[in-house]
Image: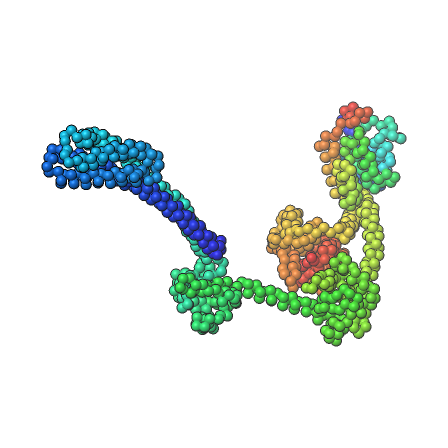
């Protein structure tokens, strides 16, 4: 709730309370006035009655006195002058009193006519008797001699003793009863007034004080809530909030300020705010504050400004500051809100750097980057430097001022391209014939997309590349591809022939050999005794040659199979492939002492079956050529050469003459006499084929009597 | 004791002679029945043509692959397709060690595959082991109905 609304509500409440209070006072005054009227009336009645009782008594006394004086007159006839005067004055007084009573002023009730009516009848009756009494008394006064039996005297005596006192007694009794009634009425009135006063007071309390108390309680709660809200805002605000007095001393230092400045509230409060400022802000602040307090006018108040602030440890960070002024009571305070914007600044710097990088990237790209308008006479809006080179433009302006459509060999193509980009949103690697500003045509690939620029207008962002060379290369490649396909067909045919050939060789070439060998053996067995030693030797030679030819055929077939077999590359370990081969060699000649040093982890990507054949040949070779070594050693390992992994099989055997290295890998080439080392000379040729099929190379190093090392690589 | 015959399917007379010699050298006394081509072999096995009256059921067939008329693999296929002959032991005895022959033979249900070595001594050894296994150690399946069992022949 805003302060204004709170104040208005309070005002309304006070007005309503005042009105209620006034109403209560008015009611109170009216009630008091009414009570006073009632009381005055009753008191007047009471006074009237008391007066009547008094005059009644007076009347009775005067009657008794008149009767007594008359009696004396009768007893002392001589001394009568003074007595007669006394009797006369008493009678005249009685007449006056009676006249007063009879006039009704005293007997009649001032307001209650009924009472007057009740009283008037005996009063009139009494008046007649009194007139008789007065007449009798006046008669006596007029007589010269008064006798005892004078009828006037008798009348006086009789009336003073009986008739008049009785009548007066009745009236007195009536007046006393009347007085008691009035007293009771006064008592009732006073009590009622008392109760009414109490009730009014209670009502006033209910009507005025209870709402007032409730209101006050609520206002206090509101004020407390507002205070707590303020406190919470100050404590949890992300921005630093600091208040200072006119002297610059800090009064409030919230938790965000503690975090931002590395200063506790206890440390900060009381210190001058310039602690938080580096120079020259510090001096500027002191001067600005003094000027403001002096003359008013500030560049800071109510503005959001970027400043530099200083932490406790002296580091400076960029911040946003807004200052407002508060007057609390008689005191002026300034409230500053400070936001640490170093992260934002860093982000802005990062963005600026990134933008610069992108600009640089675009500027340095070898391909043309542009933005243009789709209209037929549209121009480029932006181009990178590569565009100038691409279109052989002398300057940026020269290209920017050229209609884009003029750069196309066929303007129709440009129109179609524009329509497509606008429709589909983009084109990718569209090959278009364009022309430079100097008129040189070339093939370009355009990748572009439709965008809306800042003004909401349609524009094309694109990348353009000179693909003349690429197109020529593609042409060459497709020609090569056609050649290659043709050759593949031929090779396929050759392969099929080769396969049929080796199948035939496998079956047919070996059969006669078996016959030659078999029957030679049969001859030896069945007719050996009829032959001489030389004849038997010849037959043995026939058999040896036959078997050797069989071996040759087998090896040739293997070699051709290695060439024909499909290559299935999988990860495999040369060491793991070599172990069983080595074990097989040991088993074949258990009497030999050969140390195999096969490295572990020789993982390669190759065809395990073909690699096993290659390793078999290499290890066989090594095994064979170390047969004369007492301590033969065969090593399988790898090394790194010019960034390439090279595998090798090394032995310390007979070695070879380096002059014939190039003959090593040719089929049926042998560097040693058969009698020295048996073999048909096809093993290394097989190794070479396998290595080549893997995309690798194979070579050998060695010298006679110094062992040999066979190196190979396995391509990718 | 009477032995069930061995059927040797072989078109090359040299190989036939050498095989017979090797069998004799290994003292295998089973009667040897020779078929010189696939058609002949099938006639024998299915008791058709000249072999209509045959009663003995062979103990094992030694089958060459490269044969005139009907080749060895076809013979094997027909044998394995027949309800009665399916159980007949067939040993491929050939010059070829082409992988495709090897794979195809086993795929069609050959029981063994032996490549005839050029060295006759090795051949004799191979035949010895062959005879030892198929004629002595191996329990042959009982003869199908209508063909004689070893005891009955």
Please report the residue visible at 84 percent of the width from the left and 57 percent of the height from the top.
A486
Location of the C terminus of chain A (image quadrant): bottom right
Residue nearer the viewer, A624 or A697: A697
Colouring mode (rainbow / by chain / secondary structure / one colour):
rainbow
Where in the figure is residue A508, as x and y percent of width and height?
A: 83, 46
All told, the count of numbered labels is: 0
Name the outermost residue toward the top.
B152
Where in the figure is residue A491, as x and y percent of width and height?
A: 82, 55
Name the outermost residue toward the bottom.
A394
Residue nearer the viewer, A271 or A131: A131
Left or right of residue B47, residue A712 in this image: left
Q: Is residue A674 visible?
A: no
Where in the figure is residue A117, as x and y percent of width and height?
A: 33, 34
| A117 in relation to A397, above or below | above
| A19 in relation to A301, above or below | above
Where in the figure is residue A113, as x and y percent of width and height?
A: 35, 36
Name which quarter of the figure residue A659 lies in.
bottom right
| A632 in relation to A71, above or below | below
Residue nearer the viewer, A367 or A687: A367
Please report the residue visible at 65 percent of the width from the left and 64 percent of the height from the top.
A642
Please report the residue visible at 58 percent of the width from the left and 65 percent of the height from the top.
A348
Name the outermost residue toward the right.
B49
| A700 in relation to A584, above or below | below
Please report the residue visible at 28 percent of the width from the left and 36 percent of the height from the top.
A179
Q: Is residue B106 visible?
A: yes
Residue nearer the viewer, A212 or A105: A105
């Amino acid at each position: 709730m805003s302060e204004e609304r709170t104040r208005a509500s309070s005002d309304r409440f006070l007005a309503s309370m005042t009105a209620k209070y006034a109403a209560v006072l008015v009611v109170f005054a009216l009630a008091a006035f009414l009570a006073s009227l009632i009381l005055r009336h009753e008191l007047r009645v009471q006074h009237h009655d008391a007066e009547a009782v008094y005059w009644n008594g007076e009347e009775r006394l005067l009657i008794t006195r008149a009767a007594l004086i008359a009696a004396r007159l009768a007893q002392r006839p001589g001394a009568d002058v003074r007595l007669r005067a006394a009797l006369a004055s008493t009678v005249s007084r009685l007449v006056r009193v009676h006249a007063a009573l009879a006039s009704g002023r005293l007997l009649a009730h001032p307001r209650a006519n009924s009472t007057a009516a009740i009283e008037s009848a005996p009063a009139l009756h009494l008046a007649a008797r009194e007139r008789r009494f007065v007449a009798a008394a006046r008669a006596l006064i007029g007589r010269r001699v008064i006798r005892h039996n004078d009828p006037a005297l008798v009348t006086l005596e009789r009336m003073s003793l009986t008739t008049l006192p009785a009548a007066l007694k009745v009236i007195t009794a009536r007046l006393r009863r009347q007085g008691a009634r009035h007293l009771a009425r006064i008592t009732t009135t006073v009590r009622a007034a008392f109760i009414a006063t109490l009730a009014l007071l209670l009502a006033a309390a209910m009507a005025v004080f209870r709402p007032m108390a409730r209101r006050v309680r609520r206002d206090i709660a509101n004020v407390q809530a507002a205070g707590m809200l303020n406190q919470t805002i100050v404590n949890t605000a992300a921005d630093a909030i600091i208040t200072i007095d006119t002297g610059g001393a800090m009064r409030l230092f919230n938790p965000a300020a503690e975090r931002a400045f590395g200063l506790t509230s206890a440390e900060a409060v009381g210190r001058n705010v310039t602690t938080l400022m580096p120079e020259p802000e510090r001096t500027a602040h002191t001067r600005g504050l003094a000027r403001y307090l002096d003359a008013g006018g500030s560049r800071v108040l109510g503005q959001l400004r970027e400043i530099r602030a200083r932490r406790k440890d002296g580091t400076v960070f960029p911040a946003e500051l807004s200052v407002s002024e508060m007057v609390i009571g008689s005191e002026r305070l300034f409230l500053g809100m400070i936001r640490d914007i170093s992260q934002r600044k860093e982000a802005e710097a990062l963005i600026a750097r990134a933008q610069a990088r992108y600009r640089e990237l675009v500027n340095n790209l070898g391909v043309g980057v542009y933005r243009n308008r789709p209209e037929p006479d549209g121009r480029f809006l932006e181009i990178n430097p590569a565009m100038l080179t691409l279109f052989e433009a002398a300057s940026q302006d020269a290209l920017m001022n050229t209609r884009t459509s003029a750069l196309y060999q066929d303007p129709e193509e440009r129109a179609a391209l524009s329509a497509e980009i606008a429709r589909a949103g983009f084109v990718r690697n569209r090959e278009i014939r364009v022309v430079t500003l100097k008129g040189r045509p070339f093939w370009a690939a355009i990748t572009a997309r439709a965008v809306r620029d800042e003004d909401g207008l349609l524009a094309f962002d694109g990348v353009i590349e000179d693909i003349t060379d690429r197109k020529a290369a593609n042409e060459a490649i497709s020609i090569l591809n056609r050649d290659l396909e043709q050759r593949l067909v031929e090779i396929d045919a050759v392969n099929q022939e080769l396969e049929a050939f080796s199948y035939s060789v496998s079956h047919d070439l070996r059969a006669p050999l078996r016959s030659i060998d078999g029957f030679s053996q049969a001859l030896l067995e069945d007719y050996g005794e009829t032959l001489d030693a030389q004849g038997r030797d010849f037959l043995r030679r026939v058999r040896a040659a036959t078997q050797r030819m069989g071996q040759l055929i087998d090896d040739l077939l293997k070699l051709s199979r290695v060439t024909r077999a499909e290559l299935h590359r999988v990860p495999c370990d040369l060491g793991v492939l070599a172990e069983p081969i080595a074990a097989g060699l040991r088993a074949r000649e258990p009497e030999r002492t050969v140390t195999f040093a096969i490295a572990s982890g020789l993982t390669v990507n190759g065809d395990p079956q073909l690699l096993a054949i290659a390793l078999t040949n290499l290890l066989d070779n090594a095994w064979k050529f170390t047969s004369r070594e007492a301590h033969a050693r065969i090593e399988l390992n790898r090394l790194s050469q010019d960034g390439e992994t090279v595998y090798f099989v090394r032995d310390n055997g007979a070695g070879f003459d380096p002059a014939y290295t190039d003959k090593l890998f040719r089929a049926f080439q042998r560097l040693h006499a058969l009698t020295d080392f048996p073999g048909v000379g096809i093993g290394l040729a097989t190794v070479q084929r396998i290595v080549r099929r893997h995309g690798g190379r194979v070579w050998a190093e060695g010298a006679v009597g110094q062992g040999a090392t066979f190196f190979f690589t396995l391509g990718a | 004791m009477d032995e069930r015959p061995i059927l040797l399917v072989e078109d090359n007379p040299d190989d036939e002679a050498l095989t017979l010699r090797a069998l004799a050298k290994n003292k295998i006394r089973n009667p040897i029945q020779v078929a010189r081509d696939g058609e002949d072999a099938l006639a024998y096995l299915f008791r058709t043509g000249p072999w209509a009256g045959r009663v003995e059921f062979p103990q094992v067939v030694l089958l060459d692959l490269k044969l005139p008329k009907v080749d060895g693999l076809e013979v094997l296929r027909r044998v394995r397709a027949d309800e009665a002959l399916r159980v007949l032991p067939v040993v491929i005895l050939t010059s070829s060690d082409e992988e495709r022959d090897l794979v195809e033979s086993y795929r069609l249900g050959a029981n063994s595959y032996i490549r005839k070595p050029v060295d006759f001594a090795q051949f004799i050894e191979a035949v010895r082991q062959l005879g030892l296994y198929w004629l002595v150690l191996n329990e042959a399946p009982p003869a199908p109905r209508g063909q004689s069992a070893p005891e009955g022949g």
